[in-house]
Image (cartoon, coloured by chain):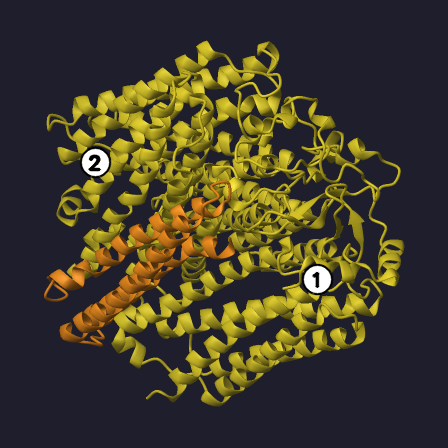
Amino acid sequence: MTRASLAIVGPVLIWAVHFSAVYALISAACAPRDLMGAGTLTATGAVLTGLAAIGCVFFLIAARRDRDGHQDRRWDAPTLSQAAWWSAVISLLGVFANAWPIAVLPGCTG
Amino acid sequence: MTDITSDTDVGSAPKAQGTAYDLSPKGEPSKDFEAIWATPPGWRVITSVSHRVVGKRFLITGFIFFLIAGLFALLVRLQLLVPENTFLDSETYNQLFTMHGTIMMFLFAIPMLEGFAVYLIPLMIGARDLVFPRLGAFGYWCYLFGGIIVLSSFLFDAAPMGGWFMYVPLSTSVYTEGMSADFWLIGITLAEIASVTAAVEIIAAILCSRAPGMTLTKMPILMWYLLATAFMIAVAFPPLIIGSILLEAERLLGLPFFDIARGGDPLLWQHLFWLFGHPEVYIIFLPAAGMVATMLPVFVGKPLFGYGFVVAAIVTMAFLSFGLWAHHMFATGLPEMSLTLFSAASTMVAVPTGVQIFCFIATLSLGRPRLTVPMMFILGFLCIFVLGGLTGVMLASVPFNLQAHDSYFVVAHLHYVLIGGFVFPMFAALYYWIPHFTGRMMSKTLGKWAFWLMFAGFNLAFFMMHLTGMRGMPRRIASYPADIGWDRLNMLSTLGAFILAAGIGVFIWDVVRHRRKGRPAGRNPWGAATLEWLYAPSAPGYNFRAIPRVTSREPLWDQPDLMDRPAAEIDGALRRCPDHRRETIGCDPVSGEPIQILRLPHPTWFPLLSASGMALLFAATLAGVYWLCAVGALIALIGVTGWVWEPSDSGVTRDIGLDGLRLPVNAVDKRSHLYVGLIGTNLILWALFFSLLFAGLYLWNTQPVFTEGTARPVEVFALLALVSGAVAFVISWMTARMAVRANLRISAGLNVFLAVALTATGLSLGCALLPIDPWSTAFAAVGWAMGAFVGALIGVGVYWSLLNALRKAVGAVHPSQGLPDMLLGSFGKAAATMALGTAAVFFLAGIAT
């Protein structure tokens, strides 16, 4: 049950790390210090997004498996698995939303 | 992590059992169970730390602030009633709208939700009190004193007038002379202490003191909302606390954090403020939605639809709401790519919010709702909040946002969200739970009048503002010219505001009236499913004579044994009270199974004393009487020392009278409430540290010229700090390990070594900073701020270490009472890690050319 509880937080934690990373990348590329170019930004962002998406999908599959695996509906885990599944879906959408600006904009000023 | 068996082993040491109790008799053998839990009579009621008393204090004080802020809003609306009005001068107008926003956000909304949380959590989870009652009382006094400081600014003709967000450079001493901004910064920072203490309290209470059998998914849904909110407070408030301290340091000491001429950046303030400010909206909204999710099933007569969906929505909203802060800064010139990132995140948060709202609607469709007064306010919430959410999605779009920025459209949006999302649910909750407070029902007729006046008045006042904003009227202007299309809309808004106020007036009348003429509520007057209605209101001070085992998420509906007999006769844990102490059951955070007996404090002066010292410290800083600051700090220190000096309770086991379980008292266990509370505290400390780190990185990234021109720390001392910090970490780890062993001499020695290692770390960091002039650049000032923060942590660590050593030296601690060392070890590791991080940053900055 502890695992099931953590499975709710896991995917959205991935979203948070991904959001912070994308924000840091954009800040690195677009602030006066100019730490990286547009190409590096896009490539790094793509890699991070891929990793984050894989993480969310992993939680999605695990939650699905957990939910289907429990025959005894009186137990708590199905409810937690349901929550974990939805959390993973929303987080996955959120990861793609984070990546959107890097994917569609050619540079810092659009 | 130790398990129950090992805890029992700890407690089974006969010598420890006898010694601990013979030498530290905190029980009150002359009193029976009822008297032990009774509220102190007369003026000594202010020593009460009971959650019922403290919760009501929060609610009443918060509501008084609500009325004051509402009065300011009416004055603002009167000024805008007609064009070119001279009812108020511009300065007074600025003061009124600033104080309206400030009080509503800091002194009304957050404290009200804290009040509901403090009052309801133990009742709903089957506990007799919160796990840290003194912390709750301390928080309340800080809030009250902070609120008084902010409000007292009117007496000195120094009311803040820079807006509730206190933007720089307007609020720096260059543009705001006098003390008005200082009243805001100091008063609000003091009041914020209540919020962060409440966060720790809520996290530990919900996770560690539930009734036997109450697993996470058998918790009332409100507990999920409050848990998420508490974690959000722990992470969201620190950036504002850091921002406020930096701004006050700039005003008081001339440090250039936001001074662009010395490498500061006004946008840094906006980042820190909105890192708090946007999650704040969800911090206010989530508990209100939780109360709706609690009441809605009662009036529908069916369980909440999609408990799992709602839990997912709560958790994801809690996270996603942190990714929206810069959508308040769309017009500040951020790069397009940043704007798009925040726009996308702002749109994304609508997804979990929508999931939750659809669950509410689905619950409504499950049965035939009873149209009670709370239910009417819930329906009002759904209408208004959904409209506010829709305009929120509009404002998340950058092009629209740039058009609507700083116009009355935004005023309309934020009031639809906040009044719809908090005030209407709050009134529903007040109508629902006031019978629990007073034992009497409020009038349905007057309630309907209150609702319709508020609903109609609100929509008249604020719907018009959408139109006023679309016609171009900016916010925060004291007057406007005639004949440009704003006159009638403003008049209607003012009329609506007074109708809304009339509705609130009817509510107040009903509150006064029902105390004498209200129908007695009786047991479970709404037919609710949750445990707070187990006893007929007003429930006794101990909440539960015996704490029942819970087997359902809706115990009063599904467990007939709870309602088929008088509540006091229900079977459960801790019916016996052999030690004449206030006690409740401590549980495993996840499974809810009992793992320990929690001993709770009896009425005490220490929270009030500590808070009074803090208030004196803050007020003397405001007045510039620095010797008085030292007096205030000393009083606070005395209060805290008296608070923590008390003898330990751990080291014994007792039969809880349920399932044959014999449990340790205040177990030395990582699942204990104290350890979980410390995790919450460390979370807050980390958030404070990262806020400072963010400030440093932000300035490093955006002000490279000034950063490169800043003097560097001395590498040798930074290296020394790294070494001594590592030693402090290792000793902290050993201290925590020693907590479960019995050798007091060794652990006292470790305490002293830890104090020495921490002191060495602090001194090394100070020496590393010495060549840097904090007034030279903002980057240098942030470096000093990091050093000061770590220095404060080290100060706490040294004090704590020496106190633990002293307690052992004078025989106040006995073998097997290792909780204080376990907690010190955990705190020491966190403090040492932050010191190591700071030292590493200083070292890298030192060797960089």
Three-letter code for the amino acid on which mark 2 is drawn: Phe
> Where residue B310 sits: x, y (%)?
39, 40
| 1 or 2: mark nearer the eye | 1
Three-letter code for the amino acid on which mark 1 is drawn: Leu
The chain shown in orange is which?
A
Judging by the rendered image, the residue that carries numbered circle 1 is B819
Residue B820 shows in the view: yes
> Where residue A17 sits: x, y (%)?
34, 63
Dot 1 or dot 2, earlier in sequence: 2
- Residue toward you, B631 or B299: B299
> Where residue B11 sits: x, y (%)?
79, 59
Q: Which mark identifies residue B679?
A: none
SS class of the residue under badge 2? helix
Residue B102 shows in the view: no
- Residue toward you, A70 or B696: A70
Judge whether B662 appears above or below B522 on screen: below
In the image: residue A9, left or right of residue B732: left
SS class of the residue under badge 1? helix
In the image: residue B700, left or right of residue B423: left
10 Å crowding of disc 2: few (<14), some (14-19), many (20+): many
Judge whether B753 appears above or below B541 on screen: below
Question: Which corner quadrant of the image does residue B709 belong to?
Answer: bottom left
Which residue is found at the position 34% from the left and 46% from the top? B162
- Residue toward you, B659 or B475: B659
Colour applied to chain B: yellow
Q: CA distance from mark 1 to mark 2?
A: 54 Å
Judging by the rendered image, the residue that carries numbered circle 2 is B409
> Where residue B337 sits: x, y (%)?
17, 61
- Residue toward you, B354 or B252: B354
Q: Disc 2 is attached to a residue of which chain?
A: B
